[in-house]
Each structure stands twice: as C-alpha cells, then as structure tokens.
Amino acid sequence: MTKSNSDKSVSVIQELQHFAFSQQGSMTILRMLGYGLLILALFDIIEMLVPPNFMNPGWEFQTIGALVERVPVPLIGFVLVFFGELYSRTKLEIPLLKFLSWITLLLGVVFILFIPLGVINTVRLNNQSVAQIKTASTQQITQAEQLEKRLSQTSPEQVSNFLKSQGRSLDGQKPEEVKNQLISDVSKAKAQIKTQAEATQSLRGLNLIKTSAKWNLGALVAGVLFISIWKGTTWARR
C-alpha cells in the first residue's frame, strides 16, 4: 500500500470515528426524549383511568377513544428508547429495556382486546340512545294524544269562549272549524314527533358507528405496532 493510500485510509477511519462520536451524543438525546415521552404518556393514562368507572359503557368507550387518540406519543417514545439497541447503554438500562420490551407486548395485547370491548360498548350505547329517544318521543306523543282527546270532547262554544279568554278571535271561522283545525294540528305534531325521533336516532347511530370504527381500527393499528416493536426488540430480552 502506498503512502497516499495509507493516508486516505487513516483519514476515512478518523472521519468514521468522528461521525460515531457525534452520533453517540445525538443518540443519548433521542433516548432521553423517548423516556420523557413515555413518562408523559404514563401521566395521561393515570389521568384518564382515575377515578375508574368500569362497566359504564359511556366511560369505557370514551376512555378507549382517548387512549387510541394519544397512542402516537408512547409509540414514538418506545422507538426512541430502543434506538441504537445495546450500543452505549448503562448497566442500569439493560433490565429496564427488557422490562419495556415486555410492556410493548402487553400494550399490544391490550389494544387488540379493546376492539371487541369497543364493539360491545357501541351496541350498548346505541341501545341506550334508542331507549332514551323512544321514551322522550313516547311521552310527547302521549301528551299530544291527551290534548287531542280533550279537544275532541270540547264543544265548539267552549273553544270559542277559550279563544276569547285568551284575547284571540275566530277570524271569521266557525268554532267547529277552529276545533277541527286544532285537532288536525295536534295530529300533524304527533307525526312530526315520530319523524324527528327517527331522524335523530339515525344521525346518532351513524355518528356512533363512525367514531367506533375510527377508534377500533386505531386500536388494531396500535396493537400491531406495539407487537412489532416487541418482536423487533428480541435483543433487549436476551
């Protein structure tokens, strides 16, 4: 090897060493950022789960959604923590990395299990919504039917006297015509109540399904990513 080639080789080695040393500093910063993101994610989880309200479909549904919405933070945190594998690690980090690797598997399984729970809660919430709307519309229809019954039993003279007591006139109409018009208006109101209840339920059901699909698919993606991280960190569990 000539002197010129030897000098070039030494220069390349020095550049590689300089690059490696510079990367070590950047790697430390990235790992510290990862640990920080995991701690912040832990604070979020504690805040969402305290106080717990298990068996409440609304609370469970919203909590799953909140966890799915915030899952990018821990995912990025784990990737940064595991960056560089075992290169330039302290002795205290080795058992911690092993623990965190198993945590990713646990989180992956938990997010996968969120899917059937989310579907069940979607059905329960939809049933609750149907029952609430049905109860409210039934009460309104019952009131309208009671009013319709009272009107049918009211004489035209009583209708005329009632309007006069309210400071209103018949506007040239006969009391019988006014009575029939009021009965007709109440009948139309009953039909509108039913139509509005059906439209409200349809809209609520659609929004619930869209939200459920978004969160359940998000839980599936998150679960797969966590399990992928677990598979990719076999080196940490050796």
Image: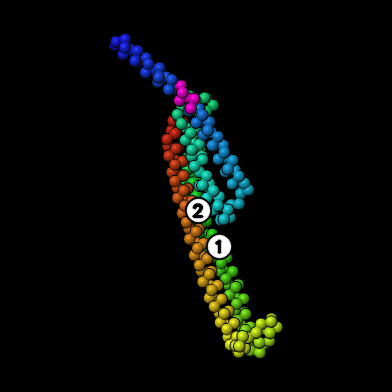
Question: Is 21 situated left or right of 50 in this image?
Answer: left
Which residue lies at the image location 34% right of the left edge and 15% below the top edge? Answer: 8
The residue at 44%/30% (across/down) is 235
Q: Residue at x 44, y 46 (%)?
A: 221
Q: Nearer the viewer, residue 182 or 39?
A: 182
Vertical placement of residue 104 versus 214, above or below:
above
Which residue type does callout 2 highlight?
Gly
Name the residue tied to disc 1: 128
| Residue at the (44%, 42%) spot, across then down | 225
Q: Residue 202's spot in the image, x, y percent?
A: 49, 65
Compare residues 195 and 170 and report the one nearer the observer.
Answer: 170
Q: Secondary structure at mark 2?
A: helix
Name which of mark 1 and mark 2 comes first in the sequence.
2
**Amino acid at the residue labelled 1:** Gln
- Nearest the viewer among 58 and 170 is 170
Q: Which residues are magenta?
A: 21-26
